[in-house]
Amino acid sequence: MKDINTIIQEKKPKPKLSNLIFAFIGGATVSVLGQFIMDMIVRYTDLSKSEAVTPMIIIIIALTCLLTGLGVYDKLATIFGAGLFIPITGFANSMCSSALESKHEGLVYGIGSNIFKLAGSVLVYGVVATYLVGVVRFIYENL
Amino acid sequence: MRTYKLDSTYVLNYATAATINEDKGELRGKLDTVFDDIYCDEKNYELAEQKLMKTSIENVLKKSNLRLNDLELIVSGDLMNQLMTTYYGLRHISIPVIGIYSACSSSALGLIIGSNYAVNGKKVLVTTSSHYAAAERQFRYPNEYGLQKKEVVTTTTSGAGSIILTSKKHPIQIEAYTLGVIQDFNYKDVNDMGGAMSIAAYDTITTHFKDTNRSFKDYDYVVTGDLGSLGLSVLKALFKENGYTDSLDNLVDLGTMIYKGCPECYMGGSGCACSMLMLCGKYLPMIENGKINSLLYVPTGALHNPIAVFQKQSIPSIAHAIVFRKAV
């Protein structure tokens, strides 16, 4: 007689290969778009290539927030999965969606305290990792 | 013995309210009120759920030609923290309210509690509601958060159903009920509520059969609440593994049916309203019209708590069973 855990594992749908392919297409599209925006900035402004990174990221974030607000982003993310989740688009969407969701609880208790609900972990461990790398680099360069 | 017989509990009337999404599948054209969007003309999702609950209550009172003050009691359940829909939605009425939480099996628990008060001609209203966006927000992630959902998730139903119970004879009788026991087999996949709840449905159905000496062939339908297609197949496999040789053709799942033909709904519907809408929208009319005679109604509830899940606790579940029958 099989136990219930075995039965569930047998019946669970297997992960779809198409998810992998769509994630690749999604991620690639975001990357190509980012590169295109960056090239345009270098071409039509006085900014150098390394200076163009920041405005490019800002444009991608703005686009993501716009799509989130219009209710389109979550539908795209359902299709492209990790392809949109891993780039900065995922980070921007997590903040924007949390803010949108909390708007009825007001500016302070709603948006203010909830905007980093999902993105908070990324920031905390991003900063911690930066410190650790910084300390290692400091020791390496001064010894 | 976990099964209790009821001598004279009848369904006086029933009514529903839901949104456009529920009007597409199995319940198309069978709902009393359908709102065009999930806000239901309200400012936010929580108020929308309260509106759904109030609308279903208004509908059932209108259908049965009663006023609110004719009721003895309202038993109400929902999924929100502190039973927000129940207590905020019903705060301006002047009759007693019992708020209950039994996750998605609240409809059964409400009917069980209600039937014990619906004696000597008293009328008790039982209502449950749930709302997709409000539940998503509380239990999972923000609605606009772009997350690729797992294949095994179910979709919370937006809607509410209300049933008035009485002890005076009406076409639909509640004949007996079986109380559920909390089940837990250390299952931790928070996306797959159906799998977690299948054991509770199995336990309650088999206990009911043992207590009453009945089996699948004694009922026109045995319906589970919201296991979804995965949970239903696990439940069927459990029966087969444990040596049930009966045909399981009349064992169906309401969550699997409610969003029939909706690929974005994954494994099917869930939530307090899912089993209630299907009961009031499809099965009670079938009993009333004489299309079927008997129904074993087994809503299932995953009793998980988001904090407990983060603390790596497993998911307990429960199911209660109710026997509906054409009154003779």
Image: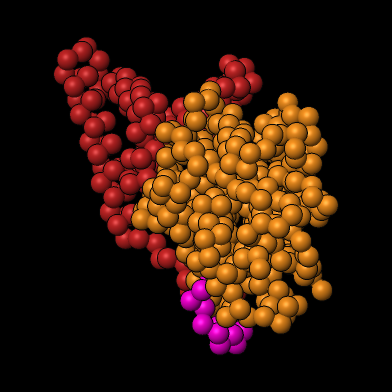
Q: Which chain is red?
A: A
Q: What shade has chain B been given?
A: orange
What quarter of the picture does the N terminus of chain A occupy?
Answer: bottom right
Report how many numbered discs are placed on residues in the image.
0
**Place of residue A106 in the rendered image (x, y in percent of width and height, measured from the top left):** 59, 18
Say which of B8 and B116 sits in front. Answer: B8
**Magenta stretch encompasses residue B8:** no
- Corner quadrant of residue B193: bottom right
**Magenta stretch encompasses residue B246:** yes
**Place of residue A78 in the rendered image (x, y in percent of width and height, measured from the top left):** 37, 45
Residue at 57% x, 80% y is B217
Horizontal side, residue B121 vs residue B169: left or right: right
Identify the magenta region.
B240-251
Say which of A105 and B83 sits in front. Answer: B83
- Corner quadrant of residue B322: bottom right
Residue at 66% x, 51% y is B12
Asked if one can make out residue B133 in the rendered structure from this viewpoint, the answer is yes
What quarter of the picture does the C terminus of chain A occupy?
Answer: top right
> Coloring scheme of the render?
by chain
**Place of residue B279 in the rendered image (x, y in percent of width and height, measured from the top left):** 56, 56
Residue at 20% x, 13% y is A45
**Place of residue A137 in the rendered image (x, y in percent of width and height, measured from the top left):** 50, 34
Asked if one can make out residue A9 in the rendered structure from this viewpoint, the answer is no
Residue at 46% x, 27% y is A96
Q: Looking at this rendering, what residue extends furthest in the left direction? A: A43
Q: Looking at this rendering, what residue extends furthest in the top direction? A: A46
Horizontal side, residue A35 vs residue B290: left or right: left
Horizontal side, residue A58 vs residue B303: left or right: left
Say which of A44 and B3 sits in front. Answer: B3
Is the magenta region chiefly helix, strand or loop? Answer: loop
